[in-house]
Amino acid sequence: MKHLTILGSTGSIGVSTLEIVAAYPDRFRVVAMTAGRNLELFARQIKAFSPRIAVVAAQEDVPRLREMCSGVTVEILGGVEGLIAAATADETEMVVAAIVGAAGLVPTAAAIRAGKDIALANKETLVTAGHLFMNMVAEYGVKLYPVDSEHSAVFQSMEGHRSEDITRIILTASGGPFLNTPTEQLAGVTVRDALNHPNWSMGRKITIDSATMMNKGLEVLEARWLFGVPVEKIDVNIHPQSIIHSMVEYVDGCVIAQLGSPDMKAPIAYALSYPERVATGVKPLDLTALSGLTFFRPDREKFRCLGLAYRAIKDGESMPAVMNAANEIAVEAFLEGRLGFMQIAQVIERTMDAHEAHNLKSIEEVLLADRWGRDRAREICRGMVN
Ligand SMILES: NC(=O)C1=CN([C@@H]2O[C@H](COP(=O)(O)OP(=O)(O)OC[C@H]3O[C@@H](n4cnc5c(N)ncnc54)[C@H](OP(=O)(O)O)[C@@H]3O)[C@@H](O)[C@H]2O)C=CC1
Ligand SMILES: CC(=O)[C@@H](O)[C@H](O)COP(=O)(O)O
Ligand SMILES: [Mn+2]
């Protein structure tokens, strides 16, 4: 029996994780789970999975959740302290890090320091503080399993091989809903258009990141830290079918890939049950039913966010954290109708232009850089007319 904490149980990854837990009650037990604002779903999850601890992000939501769960034996907590309590619960062996954005940093760091293994969906932790997280993982001797589909694919393609034999990691990208939209039409696309991902059903923030291709920029950073491979050896190929989830090329010229129907239950289950595999209900792949698998290079002029991510990688130090913060603010503004699609990249670029990269020596310093990026990006957003 593996005891789990699920950070972000009400999200897209959280819900898929709970589907796997529900299918294997003899393998997995939820000790603690956390939510943001979706109290209705969270209350239902608490009743269905009987965690010992349930945490809402906002302290002011605690009384309402307690009322919704009256009669249920569960300790309900709130705020960052509550998230840390969930992440470090005594019985927990593995923490599924599925909060969206930099809000996942503190509880994930607390989990590592408490010696918990991590199933990592929250890519923003590695984007903003990859060097610190990887050092902590080594120092506390915990295991870090990638959940992000591309990184799970790379992880699977690396098994049994030596990382020094890798010549290239090839991350695949769907290209998002605007892959074939002419650049001059991008300024006029709507939130609804941008949320219409061709292959994956995901939370709103990552779906917009896929539309701008910032998601792939974040994933290059994530891969760089997870696998310790220099960025020069990480390529991005557009692969509109999202069937090959990523590939690894070795010195002998062999390329190993992982394929499957696009469904996050597969990489989540692998992270939870590693090294075993369990049935997930993911649709079996019928290659003969596909009209073809295609690949080409991304257009960094059209998808400016991808270019900005490469710039942040080059600048290094605090720049990725600031870029990530500006992206979170710009995506939120776009989703709320305060910014046009093309203005997302403008806000990020102007925030980065205003920032002088500096060394980040602790999670506290990362949080300061994150705060700086958010404040500056908000100012820039306010000065823009949609
Ligand atoms: N969805 C996917 O297929 C994939 C996701 N990822 C990554 O996984 C992470 C989660 O993505 P996804 O599940 O799509 O996101 P969702 O938006 O669907 O879910 C996010 C979760 O985080 C909670 N949350 C939001 N803000 C806060 C906060 N400030 N403090 C605490 N909890 C908060 C939400 O609570 P509530 O809903 O109750 O407000 C929800 O439980 C992201 O980092 C994403 O990049 C990676 C690969 C694939
Ligand atoms: C499912 C997953 O891992 C997402 O990160 C996915 O990769 C998004 O698709 P894009 O390739 O369009 O960014
Ligand atoms: Mn991904």
Image: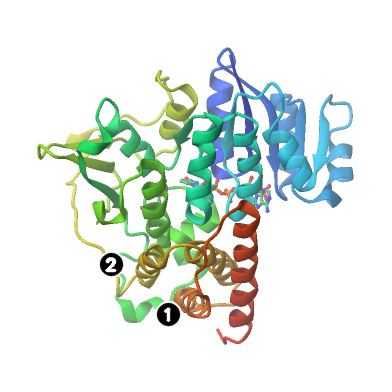
248 vs 220: above or below = above
Work out whether residue 364 can be spotted.
yes
What is the x, y in percent for residue 239?
Answer: 25, 52
Q: Report the residue at 72% width, 41% height from top.
A: 83
**Mark 2 is on which residue type?**
Asn
The residue at which mark 1 appears reads as 187
Q: Report the residue at 88% width, 26% height from top.
A: 71
Please count the marks in the image: 2
Between 257 and 116, the one nearer to me in the picture: 116
Q: Quadrant of the C terminus?
A: bottom right
22 vs 108: above or below = above
334 vs 9: above or below = below
Which class describes the residues within 10 Å of circle 2: few (<14), some (14-19), or many (20+)? few
Mark 2 to mark 1 CA distance (whole Å): 14 Å
What is the x, y in percent for residue 52?
Answer: 76, 25
Which class describes the residues within 10 Å of circle 1: few (<14), some (14-19), or many (20+)? few
Report which quarter residue 372 is drawn in: bottom right
The residue at which mark 2 appears reads as 180
Q: Give the side of residue 81 with respect to residue 18, left or right.
A: right
What is the x, y in percent for residue 165?
Answer: 20, 37
